Amino acid sequence: MSDETIEQTEMSQSEERWMEQAKILSQALPYMKRNSGKTIVIKYGGHAMGDPAMARLFARDIVVLRQVGSNPIVVHGGGPQIGAMLDKLSIKSDFIDGLRVTDKETVEVVEMVLSGSINKGIVSNINEAGGFAVGLSGKDGHLILADKLTRTKRDADSNIEKVLDLGLVGQPREIRPHILEFFKESDITPVIAPIGSGPEGETLNINADTVAGAIAGATSARRLLMLTDVEGVLDGNGKLIPELTVSQARERIADGTISGGMIPKIETCIEAVEAGVSGAVIIDGRVAHAVLLELYTERGAGTLIIPDV
């Protein structure tokens, strides 16, 4: 093959790639229009946050959302990083029903890790990708007012229900989204650490999924995207269920199709939808550009929970 033929082949391949890129943008246009001006709340965690390459791709996706007119709000977790720091400081940490028991010493570490290294790392990635992000915790601007979370457990032998003391673990009582409205108008992407202020001004550690759902409801978001380390909700044959109504989701919980750690995530989605969010999605955060695939393609990238018709 001559040099001229090779050059013509390479040019042809380049043109095909350019045409494919143009086709993708054209197909995404209706979805861009649908989400323009709309708030998208994204719970960010798991593999998507732990892998540096995926973290950079996520940051670029957030910048894309801003560029096409959407209003992304990022709420992040950080359980593994908190656990690692507690181990490093030789602070013992226990769990009850998947929730970290949080004493005063522990909550100081939780706040340091969530509002410090993790939050600022996400902000830095978004800024380096060409965006403009600002890190917050729920304590800033009284964004999240919280109460101490209580859990009860019934003793199998005595049948007596006991109140479990989780320490400084909270649940949102009120979301004050005025500060988020300011960021929306100024094209700033808020990145929120799930820390709230208790009734006495104390710092409370709150589950990131719960915070994301509460913020989505308070801001009347179009979508709540929950990035996880699973494909989505699977049926009895292990195949992805692309869409469920609230009633169908509850039925899947009752019949055991949805089980284990997926139950609280789906319950958060249901609560958000019932609070006025148009749809909540369980997304596989291990997939590159999962956020863009969900919002700007017909196929989507997970399981969408929508209101009952």
Image (tube, helix red, strand yellow):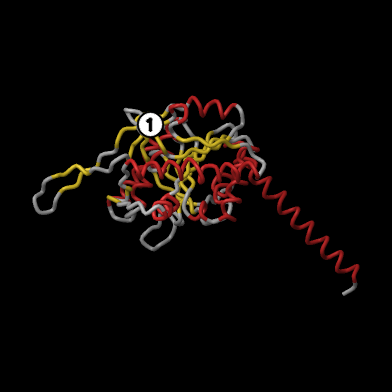
Q: Position of residue 135 (x, y in %)?
A: 53, 37
The residue lying at 32 percent from left, 39 percent from top is 168
Q: Quadrant of residue 28?
A: top right
Q: Which residue bears the numbered disc 1?
A: 197
The residue lying at 37 percent from left, 54 percent from top is 90
The answer to whether 284 is drawn above or below residue 182 in the figure is below
Is residue 5 left or right of 195 when viewed as pictured? right
The residue lying at 78 percent from left, 61 percent from top is 13
Q: Position of residue 150 (x, y in %)?
A: 25, 39
The answer to whether 253 is drawn above or below residue 211 in the figure is below
The answer to whether 6 is drawn above or below residue 309 in the figure is below
Q: Residues within 10 Å of mark 1 (few under 14, many from 20)?
A: many
Is residue 2 left or right of 94 when viewed as pictured? right
Residue type at tag 1: Ser
The image quadrant where one finds the C terminus is top left
- The secondary element bearing badge 1 is classed as strand
* Residue 46 visible within the image: yes
The answer to whether 136 is drawn above or below residue 233 in the figure is above
Q: Quadrant of residue 146?
A: top left
